[in-house]
Image (cartoon, rainbow, N blue to C red):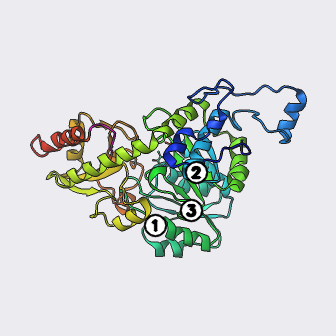
C-alpha cells in the first residue's frame, strides 16, 4: 500500500477528502469505494501464505490485522490529518485504550487535563491504576499546573480541547513543549475540534485520535475510531497491540466513515456557521443565564481559539438555562426539532443535560471543579436550517417560567 501511494500533496484538503486512497480502486473500476466485507483472504499458494506471515510478501492476511476498506479509510484520514501513519479502531474508546495500553507499563505516570470524556476518565482513574500506572489530573488551562505535575516517570500527556461539555480550551503548543521537555508523548483527543478546525500534530502533539462516531460519520450511524501519528509508533507498538487484542474497525463501518469524509469539511463548516448563530441568539435570550462558545469574543479563551482553531468556535454550544435543573428539563422537553440525545456530531441537532447523563458518575465536587452545573446543557448543532433551530430554541425557552414553576 505504501509504495504505490499516489502523491496527493499538490491537492488541497477538500479534494483529498474525496479522492484520497483512490488508487485502491479494484479492477472493476468502481467510482464509489468497494466494501470488502471479508474476514479472511485466499492465498494463491501455500508458499504465498507462508511469505505473508513472515512479512516477506505484502498482502492481507486477516481482517483483525487489516482490511482493504479499512486501509482506504485510514489512508484518507492520514492525508486529511497530514500524519505519516494511521490505524483505525472499532470506536473512539478503543482508540484511547489502544494508545494507553500500547504506550504504558507498570511504574509509568500519565498526566492529563481534568475535563475529559467520561470513559477516558474511567481508564485513567480506575483501570490504569490497577496495572500500576499512576495518573495526575490538572486544570488544562493552567500551564504552571502542567509543568509542576510532570515527573521523571511521566510517559504520556493526554488532553481534549475544546473540552466536554464546558468548551474550555487547552493550549496544545504550550503543553507540547512541556511534554517534550519531559520526554513524554503528547496525545490529543481532537473530537470536539474535528480534523477540519484543528491540527494537533502541526502544533507539536505526537499522536492525535478521534471517535469517528461523531463528525466523521456525521449522521449518527456507526461507531469507529482512529489513531494518527508517526510510522514507528503506529506501525510498531500500536499495530502490535491492535493485531493481538482485536479492537479492529469493521469494514462496513470503515466504508461508512470513508464516505463520510467526502462531505466532512462542508458539513463541519455548516455545523460551525449554525453554531455561531445559535450561540449569538442564545446570548441575547432572557431565559439564558450564560452561553459558552469559543468563537464568541466573550469566551475567556477566545484568543486561543483564534490561534488554535482559526477563530471558528466549533460545532457545539453549551449554555445555562435560568432557574436550574427542573427548568433545563422543561426546556429540553419542549424542544421539537432538537432531539434529546447524548451523541454529538450528527446532522440532527442533539441536546444533552451533562449532570444527569454523560457526567452522572462524577461527584458533585468533581463536577463543581469542572463548572458543570445542574442548569448546563450541551447542544450539538446540526445541519437543519438555522432559522428553524433558533425558532425551536426560542419557543422552548420562551415559556420558561410561565409554566408550573
Ligand atoms: C464520543 C467520544 C469519545 C468516545 O468515542 P466512542 O466512539 O463513543 O467510543 C471519546 N472522546 C470524545 C471527546 C468523544 O466525544
Q: For ligand 1, tell me if the residue under mark 3 lies within 8 Å.
A: no
| Quarter of the figure that contains the C terminus | top left
| Quarter of the figure that contains the N terminus | top right
- Residue 348 placement (x, y as % from top left): 34, 36
Q: CA distance from mark 1 to mark 2?
A: 30 Å
**To which residue does mark 2 refer?**
10
Q: Earlier in the sequence, mark 1 or mark 2?
A: 2
**To which residue does mark 1 refer?**
171
Within 10 Å of the Cα at label 3, are there few (<14), some (14-19), or many (20+) other Cα atoms?
Answer: many
Label 2 SS: loop
Q: CA distance from mark 1 to mark 3?
A: 11 Å
Q: Quadrant of residue 124?
A: bottom right
Label 1 SS: loop
**To which residue does mark 3 refer?**
205
On the question of residue 378 being in view, the answer is: no
| Residue at point 54%, 61% (across, down) | 202
Q: Quadrant of residue 395?
A: top left
Q: Nearer the viewer, residue 22 or 330?
A: 22
- Residue 255 placement (x, y as % from top left): 56, 32
Amino acid at each position: 500500500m505504501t509504495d504505490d501511494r499516489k502523491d496527493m500533496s499538490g491537492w488541497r484538503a477538500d479534494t483529498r477528502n474525496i479522492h484520497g486512497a483512490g488508487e485502491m480502486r479494484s479492477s472493476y473500476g468502481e467510482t464509489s469505494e468497494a466494501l470488502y466485507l471479508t474476514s479472511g483472504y485466499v492465498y494463491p499458494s501455500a508458499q504465498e501464505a507462508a511469505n505473508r506471515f513472515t512479512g516477506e510478501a505484502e498482502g492481507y492476511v486477516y481482517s483483525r490485522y487489516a482490511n482493504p476498506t479499512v486501509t482506504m479509510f485510514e489512508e484518507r484520514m492520514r492525508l486529511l490529518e497530514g500524519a505519516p501513519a494511521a490505524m483505525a479502531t472499532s470506536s473512539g474508546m478503543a482508540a484511547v485504550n489502544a494508545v494507553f495500553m500500547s504506550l504504558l507499563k507498570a511504574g509509568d505516570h500519565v498526566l492529563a487535563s481534568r475535563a475529559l470524556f467520561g470513559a477516558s476518565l474511567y481508564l485513567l482513574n480506575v483501570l490504569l491504576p490497577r496495572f500500576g500506572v499512576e495518573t495526575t489530573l490538572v486544570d488544562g488551562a493552567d500551564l504552571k499546573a502542567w509543568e509542576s505535575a510532570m515527573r521523571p516517570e511521566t510517559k504520556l500527556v493526554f488532553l481534549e480541547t475544546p473540552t466536554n461539555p464546558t468548551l474550555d480550551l487547552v493550549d496544545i503548543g504550550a503543553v507540547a513543549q512541556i511534554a517534550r521537555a519531559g520526554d513524554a508523548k503528547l496525545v490529543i483527543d481532537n473530537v470536539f475540534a474535528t480534523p477540519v478546525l484543528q491540527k494537533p500534530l502541526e502544533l507539536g502533539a505526537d499522536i492525535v485520535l478521534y471517535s469517528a462516531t461523531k463528525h466523521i460519520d456525521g449522521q449518527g450511524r456507526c461507531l469507529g475510531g482512529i489513531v494518527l501519528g508517526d510510522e514507528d509508533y503506529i506501525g510498531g507498538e500500536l499495530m502490535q497491540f491492535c493485531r493481538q487484542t482485536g479492537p479492529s474497525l469493521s469494514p462496513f463501518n470503515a466504508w461508512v466513515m470513508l464516505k463520510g469524509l467526502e462531505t466532512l469539511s462542508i458539513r463541519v463548516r455548516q455545523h460551525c456557521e449554525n453554531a455561531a448563530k445559535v450561540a449569538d441568539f442564545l446570548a441575547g435570550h432572557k431565559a439564558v443565564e450564560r452561553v459558552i462558545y469559543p468563537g464568541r469574543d466573550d469566551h475567556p479563551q477566545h484568543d486561543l481559539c483564534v490561534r488554535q482553531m482559526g477563530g471558528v468556535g466549533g460545532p457545539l454550544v453549551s449554555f445555562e438555562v435560568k432557574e436550574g435543573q427542573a427548568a433545563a428539563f422543561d426546556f429540553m422537553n419542549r424542544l421539537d426539532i432538537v432531539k434529546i440525545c447524548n451523541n454529538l456530531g450528527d446532522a440532527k441537532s442533539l441536546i444533552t443535560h451533562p449532570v444527569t447523563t454523560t457526567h452522572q458518575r462524577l461527584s458533585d465536587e468533581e463536577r463543581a471543579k469542572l463548572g458543570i452545573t445542574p442548569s448546563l446543557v450541551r447542544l450539538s448543532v446540526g445541519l437543519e436550517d438555522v432559522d428553524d433551530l433558533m425558532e425551536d430554541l426560542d419557543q422552548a425557552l420562551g415559556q420558561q417560567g410561565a409554566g408550573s414553576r
